[in-house]
């Protein structure tokens, strides 16, 4: 039985990862910003798995606030023991053309998606090194593999998370720590439902090659990859091909995207 700490664990992919971890027999701690969502998520886990002896805990914190997330993780470890697996699922998406996106909206995505991940990892890393064991799973995105129209901030944050994971993997491995990163395609979550109306028409024209996945399916693939010690985890063939061959294919993909964007812009210009 392991203690799994999940940031952003109260909804979406994070909630699905919490449920899948509990189903495997793990103790689970949730960290999120919304107390209402946290209590709902905690209650769901306790109702479904509480009688089986699994233990659950929840702490409210904004992962973009380093001291706050460190205190939350310390409280989780006090309640359920040292962190065996950290999953960083907290994230936000605010699409919009670069010139229309406020500095605050741009920076908030970097703060939550990148520094929220770094802050959570920092809070468990020393303990894992001392114990010479541990697993870290970061939630990346297909937008961390390819630039997407209208997603300059989100892509920047997710590309940065991928780079952080790659470098940390090399540093952590000699200390018995496994680092993995999952690159989900569009996933059916409340966040996606809120994000879609904000997408520019050009983004709608180019997004969707990876298909729409249910959150529980992403969680199953992510945990299976983590258990196998894989570094890069790709739900679906499209994400795998993009991850393995995207950089080679980009000279062909860019003109294809440019054509789709041009068509979308022409259609928009004709609307009254």
Image (spheres, grey):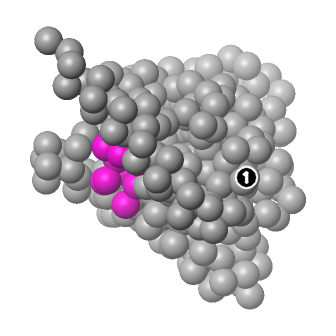
Question: x, y percentage for residue 87?
Answer: 60, 52
Q: Can residue 116 be seen in this view?
A: no
Number of numbered discs on residues: 1
Foreground: 264 or 190? 264
Residue at the image position 74 percent from the left and 87 percent from the top: 174
Foreground: 145 or 247? 247
Q: Farthest residue to the right: give it.
A: 228
Judged left or right of residue 115, residue 105 is: left
Q: Is residue 32 above or below residue 124?
A: above
Q: In which quarter of the image is residue 22?
A: top right
Judged left or right of residue 134, residue 115 is: left
Residue at the image position 51 percent from the left and 72 percent from the top: 164
Foreground: 91 or 41? 91
Judged left or right of residue 260, residue 133 is: right
Question: x, y percentage for residue 35?
Answer: 37, 30
Question: x, y percentage for residue 232?
Answer: 70, 62
Asked if residue 29 lies in the magenta stretch, the reply is no
Q: Quadrant of residue 92?
A: top left
Asked if residue 155 lies in the magenta stretch, the reply is yes
Residue at the image position 63 percent from the left and 85 percent from the top: 171
Q: What stretch is highlighted in magenta?
A: 148-156
Q: Is residue 85 above or below residue 192?
A: below
List the residue tagged with mark 1: 240
Quarter the C terminus occupies = top left
Judged left or right of residue 227, residue 15 is: left
Q: In this view, does 164 lie above or below 87?
A: below
């Amino acid at each position: 039985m392991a203690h799994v700490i999940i940031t952003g664990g109260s909804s979406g992919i994070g909630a699905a990862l919490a449920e899948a971890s509990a189903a495997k027999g793990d103790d689970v701690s949730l960290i999120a910003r919304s107390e209402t969502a946290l209590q709902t998520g905690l209650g769901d886990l306790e109702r479904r798995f509480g009688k089986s002896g699994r233990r659950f805990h929840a702490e409210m914190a904004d992962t973009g606030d380093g001291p706050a997330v460190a205190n939350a993780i310390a409280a989780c470890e006090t309640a359920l023991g040292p962190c065996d697996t950290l999953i960083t699922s907290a994230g936000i998406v605010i699409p919009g053309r670069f010139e229309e996106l406020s500095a605050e909206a741009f920076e908030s995505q970097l703060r939550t998606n990148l520094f929220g991940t770094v802050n959570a990892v920092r809070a468990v890393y020393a303990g894992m090194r001392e114990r010479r064991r541990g697993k870290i799973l970061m939630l990346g995105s297909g937008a961390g593999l390819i630039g997407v129209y209208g997603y300059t901030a989100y892509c920047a944050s997710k590309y940065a998370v991928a780079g952080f994971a790659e470098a940390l993997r090399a540093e952590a491995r000699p200390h018995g720590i496994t680092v993995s990163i999952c690159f989900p395609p569009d996933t059916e979550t409340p966040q996606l439902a809120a994000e879609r109306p904000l997408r520019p028409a050009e983004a709608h024209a180019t997004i969707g090659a990876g298909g729409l996945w249910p959150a529980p399916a992403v969680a199953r693939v992510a945990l299976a990859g983590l258990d196998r010690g894989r570094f890069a985890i790709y739900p679906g063939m499209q994400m795998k091909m993009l991850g393995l061959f995207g950089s080679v294919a980009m000279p062909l993909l860019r003109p294809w995207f440019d054509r789709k964007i041009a068509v979308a812009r022409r259609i928009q210009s004709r609307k009254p």
